[in-house]
Image: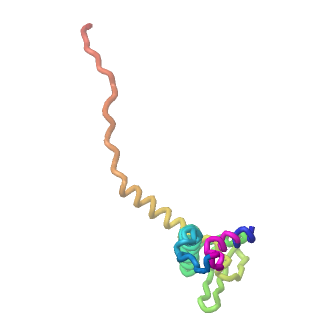
Amino acid sequence: MFNTLMILLADAAGSGTPPAGGTPQGGGGLFDNPIIFLALPGIALFYILFLRPMRKQEQERAALLTAIKKNDKIITHSGIYGTVVSVSEKEDEIVVRVDDNVRLKMVKNSIMRNLTNEEAAKEAKAAKGAKDAKPAAAPASTAVTTKEGGA
């Protein structure tokens, strides 16, 4: 496959030897190579599909770790549920209470989710949805009325 690619590149760029007449035929410009027209959209597509989402995910993760405070309910990457007892800003460590007499000291990067923040965001979204929703109008009556006295 590599050899085929090299042959195609050599053909696109020209062989470099002048034809039998002795004078080289002109051309061979930058835009004569079709690979450039494929590479540029490929690079743009790679950026849009991979690099931008990864950068956004890294920013969300950094925001999660900096927003951790005492009494937050969390889940670690290992699946341990706990409540934050203390946060050390200098050493990048936290102490998590797992049970009544069980406390674990761990690094902040071991936190996967902050349940307290997720619950607050869910409540805020529900409140906003209830506020934005218009009250439903009373449905029109679907009762069938009949005339009395025969008809």
Q: Quadrant of residue 83?
A: bottom right
Query: Relative to the observer, which residue lies in front, 17 or 95?
Result: 17
| In this picture, residue 50 sits left or right of residue 5 | left
- Residue 114 location (% of width, % of height): 59, 71
Q: Is residue 134 above or below residue 77?
A: above
- Residue 47 location (% of width, % of height): 55, 72
Q: Quadrant of residue 80?
A: bottom right
Q: Is residue 74 above or below residue 22?
A: above
Query: Looking at the rendering, in which quadrant would you find the C terminus?
Result: top left
Please say whether residue 123 is one of the residues in the magenta stretch. Answer: no
Does the rendering let one see residue 70? no
Q: Is residue 95 above or below residue 135?
A: below
Query: Looking at the rendering, in which quadrant would you find the N terminus?
Result: bottom right
| In this picture, residue 130 sits left or right of residue 35 | left
Please say whether residue 17 is one of the residues in the magenta stretch. Answer: yes
Does the rendering let one see residue 40? yes
What colour-coding does the image apply?
rainbow
- Residue 38 location (% of width, % of height): 57, 68
Determine the residue located farthest toward the bottom in the rendered image.
90
* Residue found 45% across the figure and 64% down from its top: 124
State how many labels appear: 0
* Residue found 56% across the figure and 76% down from its top: 25
* Residue found 66% across the figure and 76% down from its top: 15
- Residue 65 location (% of width, % of height): 58, 79
Q: Quadrant of residue 51?
A: bottom right
Query: Relative to the observer, which residue lies in front, 111 or 9?
Result: 9
Determine the residue located farthest toward the front in the rendered image.
21
In the image, the segment drawn in magenta is 7-20
